[in-house]
Image (cartoon, rainbow, N blue to C red):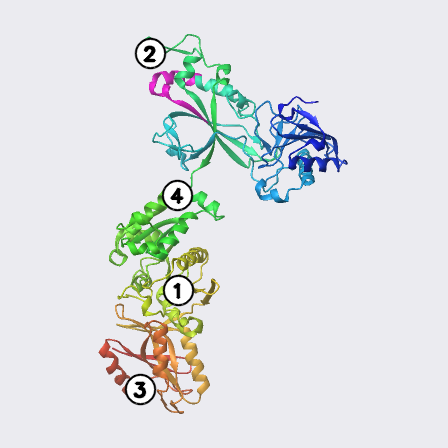
Amino acid sequence: MKYSYKEIQGKIVGINELSIERAKSIALAVLNNPAYILNPKFVKRIDGAEVILITLDIEIYQNPLNGIEEQEDIAIVCHQKDDFFPEVYALRNNFQLGLPHTNLRIESYPVSLCVSEQDFQEIKHTFNALEFVESIRNWLSLTSKGKLHAIDQPLEPFFVSKGRIIVPSNKDNIDSNNFYINPVAPNSTLFRIQKEKNADGAYFCVGFHADEQVCGFIRREPQVIKDLADFIFIKGIDLSITLSNCFNNLAQFFLEEKELLYKKIAICCGIPVKRYSQDIEPERTEELFFVTKKTIREIGIENNIWDETLDKKNIVPLSDKSFTKEIIEKIGIETYTTMIDFNRLSAALYNKEIPNNDKFTLIGVGALGSQVLSLYARTGYGKWNVIDHDLLLPHNLARHALGRDSIGFSKVEKLAEQLNFLVGEEFCKPIKSDFIKVHNNKNIISFLKESKAIIDISTSIAIGRLLARDYADKISTRRISTFLNPTGKDLVILAEDEKRKHRLDFLEMEYYRFLYKNENLHNHLIFNDDLKIRLNRNSCREISSRINQMDISMLSSICAKSIRNIIEHCDASIAIWKINDGDCTVQKYTTTPTKWKRVYSNEWKIYLNNQLLDEMHFFRAQKLPKETGGVLLGSIDTERKIVYIYDTISAPEDSDETTSSFERGIEGVLEEYNKYRKITNNQIQYLGEWHSHPKGYSTRPSELDKKLLAYLASKLLRQGYPTIMAILGDNNCHFTISF
């Protein structure tokens, strides 16, 4: 035969003598398609493999790249086992080395072509012999045009290595004179650079930044440094000469620092790689480690550069001896490719996210908080101050991001430890404290001030009110509150705007009003007693029922992503996501936050929702010239002496409405009030009454109005609550408060 490669040696046979089904199908395809397939021959090897030899007529450019010729001799090798693609070899003796999509083979083999990216087992059942031959021809044609490696394909490695080394993301932490390359597990080909010794010895590291290279593949696995010198150059000088100069410069240093003599040398080489030769900038930098098989002492003694003293305790240099290029070229090496350890930057990139270094504060790492923070760690989002005071208890394992080994420990400290270890740096700073008790601490205030946003996942109304009100003058940072409903099937996010015109307490009130106004949300805060797992419930937001982790997991992802989106925008928002158990879909409900006005300020402050005021004016306009009115509903914060008015039950049918008076009826009022209380989980209260005056009349209370207010106050003051009367006129609304 024309070529002497042992891969194609054997007995030439006819097609009927082929016994491997894969070989026979390819042979038939070759014989039945002579247009561009020339000179077919069939070979049976001694080991049972069968070879199809052909010459392919190639469509190439007028001035082809990469040395591809119009006709190329090809060998297709089929094996009896048939568990991988038939091997494809370019037989021409001077076929170009280092081309993309070629396989590693020893020097005596012809160049092996990689003609498919697919897994053979996945497409084995649809394998088409003619298409396979055409893929070889296509490989040659595209290579001649320099277009085989697609634009959207990552660049190929230069060669197959012994293994991969995980390099710390912060290379400054590597002591170049003393580190270890340890397998991550027994018999693993994945290694990690560490300070602690495991299976391998210590290394003296020498680093170089090589000249730029064009994407390609070296077909021989480097055995000695000489194998690298053909393609690795440092400022135009090949690697052997560069290392020779380096070794000679360091020789005296090695002899003075005797412990270094017993180390192997790790040559770290960064190779900038271009996709095409005409590219201006490299696409990436290939980080490679070439580790000597012998120690510095062994290399020096074996090459007669140094000698041992008689007691073999010391090394002395021999006169006029140095590390020549020829000596360096013979040094045996093992090759490792590198990969940067997981960190916040790579976490963001792997998730197709923009890296974010903003600082945030998160309060509460329960079921929802722990999973949200874990998602942020895995996506490289932000740096976090995290505040929580709870311990992890056994029942928490059903829905918490932590595991059994954390039972009895601080949730926030263990979670921070876990997530910081995950990203290899300080992602979150734990603060084991009850936020309410430490909120005025100087350090806490400093954390809040430096934060881009404060995320409250504490499920505590007390904390929400504190964040909304008690820091108004101290901290301008935007607040966001998020929690689950008692059944764990609804997620709520209340987000302030950047300028904090819509504060958390206002958003909370509008959230209650939204639940009542939207029939689809009437059961949002209602759950059965048999679902409760604790008798004491401090707030409507506390997760106190048996809820499903799958629901929390789904909503945690929505929560984490939604908060990120909210932070990127300036507006306030109120949103509820509701899981439909039937088909596992999620429905989102939103309402636009409205403005509030302070209508009274003394010992008590009264805030009125503008949307409610508009509704009251609408009711008045409908009944003019008669008077009308209704019940005032809202919430009271007795600690801060604040009344929030945000809804009304308008005049019932049995009300007495005239042009000079209004007497509110009672029909259906109590039922509607109790319904509202149930929907909001008792967060709404009766505040007083409002009525309108006809056009042109004052909104000052009449004597009759004063008597009514006094009567109402006598009832409400028993509970320690103020009583409010509002009188609506043409362009204003007058409020009177009794306390």
- Please state which amino acid type lies under the numbered disc 2: Lys
Sequence-wise, the earlier of marks 1 and 4 is: 4
Disc 1 from disc 4: Cα separation: 37 Å
Sequence-wise, the earlier of marks 4 and 2 is: 2
Disc 3 from disc 4: Cα separation: 67 Å
The residue positioned 48% from the left and 45% from the top of the image is 350
Sequence-wise, the earlier of marks 3 and 4 is: 4
- Please state which amino acid type lies under the numbered disc 4: Val
Q: Quadrant of the N terminus?
A: top right
**Residue 612 visible in rendering:** yes
Q: Which secondary structure is most common in the magenta stretch?
A: helix
Sequence-wise, the earlier of marks 3 and 1 is: 1
Disc 4 from disc 2: Cα separation: 47 Å
Q: Nearer the viewer, mark 2 or mark 3?
A: 2
**Mark on residue 423?**
4
Q: Nearer the viewer, mark 1 or mark 2?
A: 2
Identify the residue under disc 2.
Answer: 312
**Residue 452 visible in rendering:** no
The residue positioned 45% from the left and 81% from the top of the image is 618
